[in-house]
Amino acid sequence: MVSETETSLIGDALVVLGAAGVIIPAFARFRISPVIGFILVGLLVGPSGLGSLTGDYPWLRHVTIGSAEEIALFAELGIVLLLFSIGLELSFRRLWQLRKLVFGIGAAELLLCGAILGSAILLLRDQPLASAYGLGIALALSSTALVLPIAGTKTAVGKAAFSMLLFEDLALVPIIFILAALSPAASGDSAELLLTTLWQGALVVAALAIGGWFLLPKIFAQAARAKDPELFLAASLLVVIVAALATAAVGLSPIVGALLAGLMIAETEYHNEVEAITAPFKGLALGVFLISVGMGLNLRTIAAMWPQLIAAVVGVVLVKAIVTAALLRFSGVVRRGTAAEVGLLMASPSETTLIVLATALQAQLISRTTAEFWQLVTAIGLTITPLLARIGHDIARRIEMGNTEVEAEDSPPRRTVVVGFGRVGRIVAELLREHDRPYIAVDADIDTVAAARRDGFLVRYTDVGRPGSLSKLGIENADAVVLTMDDPVQQLRMTRRLRGKYPDLPIISRARGADHAAALYQAGATDAVPETLESSLQLAEAVLVGLGTPMGPVIASIHDVRAKMRHDIMTKGQLDHEPRIRRTRRHAPDGEAA
């Protein structure tokens, strides 16, 4: 017979899964972040929402969650799986490259934000010294679970945010021990316990890294031979659970073990397979955590204390945003727009803030009323994180656009002009930059321009369809113009316009196929590269090399075929052009040259 506890757990799981199944597709359809949806569901089905009506309507027990503690295990597992998926996207080499950001800016951001917030709480809320600065450090932490899914780990924003978040996750254990040591009831063994945890934690991390280096390739090789996706999934979950339990056993956070498990698997050749199989768990894990955040919001308390709560949230956000952006900008590691975006993205408190608050409460450093107030501030801050991310993105875009004209004027007068900065344009710009060839790229999508500028490319916002727009780019001094847009009509129109005004200008254009390339040659292009033919040549090259044909003869034959195709296409363009010339001459008025 099923017990009441088991029934409750099954009901909670059904509520979470049902919310995930409805919210993710619904919010994706309207292009709204599902983060807000999950938090609203937590608020709706939690103890301050419909859960408060279960006494009057018993049937609501089947679609609500009575308390946040009931899904605490699910929420903790969700954070562990999130950190595991983040670790899969990284590598030890990338972490080593980020070491200055992690232990330099990351440490400075946490300590400076903690000091400023702690001083403000000490002055404005009349808290004892230890309590005020303990709260300041807690509020200085930022949300790994929300920031990295929003920013990723490969963008300039994501790299900067991840560096600081990684330091915060590593600093969580010392923070908790220091707060325990400051407790009025603390014994003198706290410092010794902290040192014991640190050296034991270092040994466990080293053992996991060495063991993973030797064992993981063998484990996943067996799963690959079995050709069973479920075996890959089971092995992945086993690795992350063992690593999380091992770090938790010595007093470290389980999320450290989860991140380490992801990093170890990322170093193997099986990481793509593991990432694909575990991808569905990432969204679900985030949803479970966010539902627990929503359940922590109490509407009655918010309604009663809204002026103080708004003031506290705004104060925390402003301090963290300004300090983080200033540190990043003055260190010179990122551009101004990126610094502003990272500052706002990391301005809210964190899920780990709740852990530190619970520790401070247990250590009798703060009262229960104070803890509940700042827990609400944290929950509200987490709720508005997607909004802050959107505002930060817009501010970064405006900043980058404001710098466009100055940087464009400083560019060398002789350069290649790349029109369009999509997939093809970016590759062209990367190769020009790698070979130290000056260039400037233009695009009519302002978000594309802002993102490219944050990544260090010289791109400016220009709609080349407007009359006179190209004359401002210094085309008369350009080494060449490269047309990469995915609009064949606009490519033909622009090629004719450029050739008519600049007879000697090299014009290289992307083409969809042979017919489009012939039309571009006819319009005056110096060279037109058909995508379909190039993909065919690359495929043939791969086949020949795979069959054992030496690379030299293959490259030579590919070059000959490409030259012949180019000649045929150019000839076709000229033949298509000749009848039109004859027709024009036949209908020419008397007196004009034939």
Image (cartoon, rainbow, N blue to C red):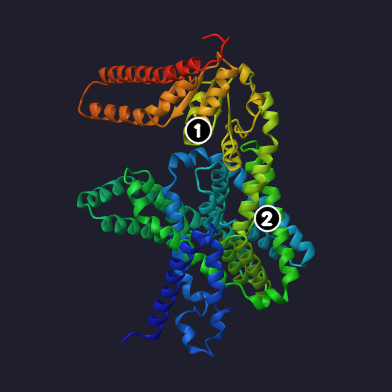
Residue 295 appears in the rendering: no
The picture places residue 34, in percent across and down from the top left corner, at 52, 61
Task: State left or right for residue 71 relative to residue 36.
Answer: left
Q: Foreground: 98 or 171? A: 98
Task: State left or right for residue 208 relative to residue 288.
Answer: left
Residue type, label 2: Gly
Position above or below: 31 against 521: below
Position above or below: 330 against 261: above
Tell me which residue sits at (56%, 51%) in the image: 165
| For discs 2 and 1, the disc positioned in front in the rendered view | 1
Tell me which residue sits at (42%, 18%) in the image: 579
**Image quadrant for the N terminus?**
bottom left
Residue labelled with disc 2: 114
At mark 1, the secondary structure is helix
Q: Foreground: 452 or 84? A: 452
| Residue 489: numbered disc | 1
At mark 2, the secondary structure is helix
Residue 235 appears in the rendering: yes
Tell me which residue sits at (50%, 33%) in the image: 489
Q: Foreground: 409 or 7? A: 409
